[in-house]
Image (cartoon, helix red, strand yellow):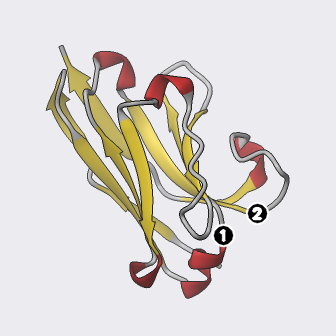
């Protein structure tokens, strides 16, 4: 069973940047689509970005376009989420997840393994 460990969250001022990392315990991680989701208090979990196994396909949510970049290093079993121009509305717990079934990469129900979550707080 794969374990996903996230890091890189924290407190940042509006306009600042953070890079989240998601490290997997299993080398088979490199064979799967990986997604980032976020959940703010009182809101449903929402899709942020995903990346195909080779890194060539990277769908991004509309709110993240031009600000967030997803990438991966399969040799390190790691997926990254670079977040720039952060705004207070980006405040949430961010989760990485390994895709397990279904064709929609933006549906959290299609992901079988999840990290523990990483708090990102953006102050105004």
Of circles 1 and 2, which is in front?
1
Q: Residue furthest right?
A: 102
Quadrant in which residue 6 is drawn = bottom left
Q: Using residue 108 as the reference point, say whether residue 82 is left or right of it.
A: left
Quadrant in which residue 88 is drawn = top left
* Most foreground residue, 83 or 21: 83
Residue topped by disc 1: 32
Q: Residues within 10 Å of mark 1 (few under 14, many from 20)?
A: some
Q: Is residue 98 above or below residue 104?
A: below
Residue topped by disc 2: 100
Identified at 33% across, 52% down, the residue is 20
Q: Looking at the image, is mark 1 or mark 2 earlier in the sequence?
A: 1
Q: Quadrant of the N terminus?
A: bottom right
Q: Residues within 10 Å of mark 2 (few under 14, many from 20)?
A: some
Quadrant in which residue 98 is drawn = bottom right
* Most foreground residue, 30 or 124: 30
């Amino acid at each position: 069973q794969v374990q996903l460990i996230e890091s890189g969250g924290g407190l940042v001022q509006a306009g600042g940047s953070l890079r989240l990392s998601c490290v997997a315990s299993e080398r088979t991680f490199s064979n799967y689509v990986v997604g980032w989701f976020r959940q703010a208090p009182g809101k449903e979990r929402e899709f942020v970005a995903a990346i195909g196994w080779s890194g060539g396909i990277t769908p991004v949510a509309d709110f993240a376009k031009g600000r967030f970049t997803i990438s991966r290093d399969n040799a390190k079993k790691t997926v990254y989420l670079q977040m720039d121009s952060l705004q207070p509305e980006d405040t949430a717990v961010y989760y990485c997840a390994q895709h397990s079934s279904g064709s929609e990469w933006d549906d959290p129900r299609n992901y079988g393994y999840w990290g523990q979550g990483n708090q990102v707080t953006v102050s105004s």
